[in-house]
Image: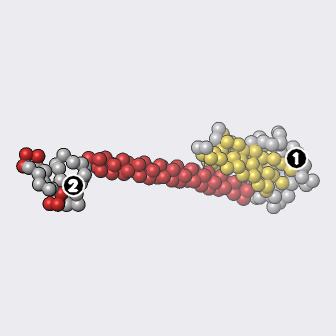
């Protein structure tokens, strides 16, 4: 087939096509506008999905880190209280506001005399669990939302009589963000 010079088109047997055509030949160079736009859209979709996966992973990591911090801090504070409560000098050397006086059951503070003769107090001030020895306060844990001490006699009944105390139960809840960790343990003092 022969085409005149006016149309600017040669026959397809020569591998040349109409310049106004949108169809690419295997020998043409570059990309069409439609191919470029499709590539941008596909890359955008894949990037969006990848960003969602990364954001979800970071959120999970942050939640796990908060829970780990809460767990570590609360376990450390509870362990300290258990060790020191085991060293109470005698059953009469325990109280809530003063040695030998238990004002309620449960209470949010405990005071006792340890084997060295020092008065030790654990108490909650706002959301800070404090330890006081010789009038000097030190923070054991922050973010503590509840702290309770329950005093039990030898028959496992709640008691407000200091000389009758046989075991002490510690309950605390530590909170960080939306994560909280409740801990409950019983202490059996060695000298009772």
Whole-percent x, y for residue 129 in the image = 66, 45
Which quarter shows the C terminus?
A: bottom right
Q: Residues within 10 Å of mark 2 (few under 14, many from 20)?
A: few
Nearer-the-camera pick, 137 or 6: 6
Q: Which residue is mark 1?
A: 158
Residue displayed at 65% across by 44% down: 144
Of labels 1 and 2, earlier in sequence is 2
Nearer-the-camera pick, 157 or 46: 46
Q: Specify whether 55 is left or right of 114.
A: left
Whole-percent x, y for residue 93 in the image = 81, 50
Nearer-the-camera pick, 44 or 67: 44
Q: Nearer the viewer, mark 1 or mark 2?
A: 2
Mark 2, secondary structure of its residue: loop
Q: Specify whether 105 is left or right of 137.
A: right
Q: Which mark is residue 128?
A: none
Whole-percent x, y for residue 133 in the image = 67, 49
Furthest-left residue in this view: 5
Q: Which mark is residue 30?
A: 2
Which quarter shows the N terminus?
A: bottom left
Can residue 21 be seen at all in this image of the molecule? Answer: yes
């Amino acid at each position: 087939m022969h085409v005149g010079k006016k149309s600017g088109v040669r026959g397809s047997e020569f591998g040349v096509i109409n310049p106004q055509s949108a169809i690419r030949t295997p020998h043409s160079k570059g990309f069409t506008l439609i191919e470029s736009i499709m590539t941008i859209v596909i890359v955008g979709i894949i990037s969006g999905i990848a960003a969602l996966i990364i954001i979800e992973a970071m959120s999970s990591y942050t939640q796990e880190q908060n829970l780990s911090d809460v767990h570590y801090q609360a376990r450390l504070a509870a362990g300290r209280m258990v060790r020191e409560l085991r060293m109470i000098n005698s059953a009469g050397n325990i109280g809530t506001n003063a040695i030998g006086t238990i004002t309620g059951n449960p209470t949010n503070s405990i005071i006792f005399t340890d084997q060295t003769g020092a008065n030790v107090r654990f108490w909650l001030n706002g959301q800070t669990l404090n330890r006081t020895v010789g009038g000097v306060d030190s923070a054991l844990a922050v973010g503590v939302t509840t702290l309770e001490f329950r005093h039990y006699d030898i028959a496992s009944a709640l008691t407000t009589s200091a000389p009758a105390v046989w075991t002490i139960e510690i309950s605390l809840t530590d909170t960080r963000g939306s994560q909280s960790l409740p801990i409950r343990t019983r202490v059996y003092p060695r000298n009772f």
